[in-house]
Structures are given as structure tokens and as C-alpha cells.
Amino acid sequence: MGSGPGIPGWFIGLFVLVILLGLAGTIWRISVARKMAEDAGLDPNTATAVTLLSKDGVDATYLASTLGSHTRAQAAHPTQPAKTAEQRLQELQALRDKGLVTNDEYEAQRQKILGSI
């Protein structure tokens, strides 16, 4: 079979190899995106769609999972409401009464609190 017309066998083999590597890479990207989405409590099907439809799909899934976990952490630990000046002055007085701050520190902090009103 030698040098007849047609496509050489090595070219067909190379073409099949490139196709297989492309499929393997796509499957890997999808599995990584789905795992990140599941770990973050997001919809894995949406992560699959984003991964398939955009060139930066895995990056987008990573960002979404990171932002989602950050938002859930904030919801689990809400910040305390700001203390009023009266509460801060009472706390400062208690610290002075216990001897944890000096009179000079007390007066300096008291002036700061009163200045913030």
C-alpha cells in the first residue's frame, strides 16, 4: 500500500488523538466545575452549563463558589450592631472601675467617644 493518493494513516491517528485529548480535557473541566459547585452548595448543572458555554467557565464557577461561601459565612456570623455612645461610656467606666485602664487612658477614650457624637 504505499504512496497512493489519500490521507496518510499517521495523520488520521494524530487527528483522533487530538479529538480524544480535547474530550478528556472537557470532561475534566466539567467534573472540576461540578465538584466546586457541589462543595459550595451551588447548582452543579449550572456550573456544567457555564463551563461548556464559556472559555472561562471553571474560573467563573470558582469565583461563584468562593463568593457563595463567603456570603454564607457572613450570614452565619452576623455582625453585632454598633454600640451607642452611652454603652461605650459605660463599658469604659467598668474597665476603669476594674483597674484595667488608667485614669489618663479613661479620659482620652472618653473624649474620643464624646467627640464621635
Image (cartoon, helix red, strand yellow):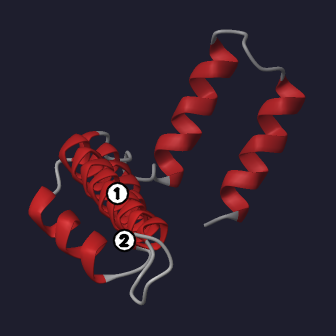
Question: Which label lies toward us, 2 or 1?
Answer: 1
Q: Which numbered disc flags the more N-terminal residue, 2 or 1?
A: 1
Residue 76 at x, y = what percent? 25, 41
Q: Residue at x 40, y 63 (%)?
A: 13
Which quadrant of the structure image shows residue 103? top right
Q: Amino acid at mark 1?
A: Arg
The quarter of the rendered structure image containing the C terminus is bottom right
**Helix, strand or loop at disc 2?**
helix
Horizontal relation, residue 117 to residue 109: left or right: left
Which quadrant of the structure image shows residue 68? bottom left
In the image shown, does 13 or 54 lie closer to the viewer? Answer: 13
Q: Amino acid at mark 2?
A: Gly
Residue to which mark 2 is pinned: 57
The quarter of the rendered structure image containing the N terminus is bottom left
In the image shown, does 44 or 4 lie closer to the viewer? Answer: 4
Please rate how many residues cluster around mark 2, counting C-alpha atoms within 10 Å: few if below 14, some from 14 to 19, many from 20: some
Q: Residue at x 64, y 15 (%)?
A: 97
Horizontal relation, residue 49 to residue 63: left or right: left
**Helix, strand or loop at disc 1?**
helix
Dot 2 and dot 1 residues touching (CB under 8 Å) = yes
Residue 116 at x, y = what percent? 66, 64
Residue to which mark 1 is pinned: 29
Regarding residue 31, the answer to whether it shows in the image is: yes
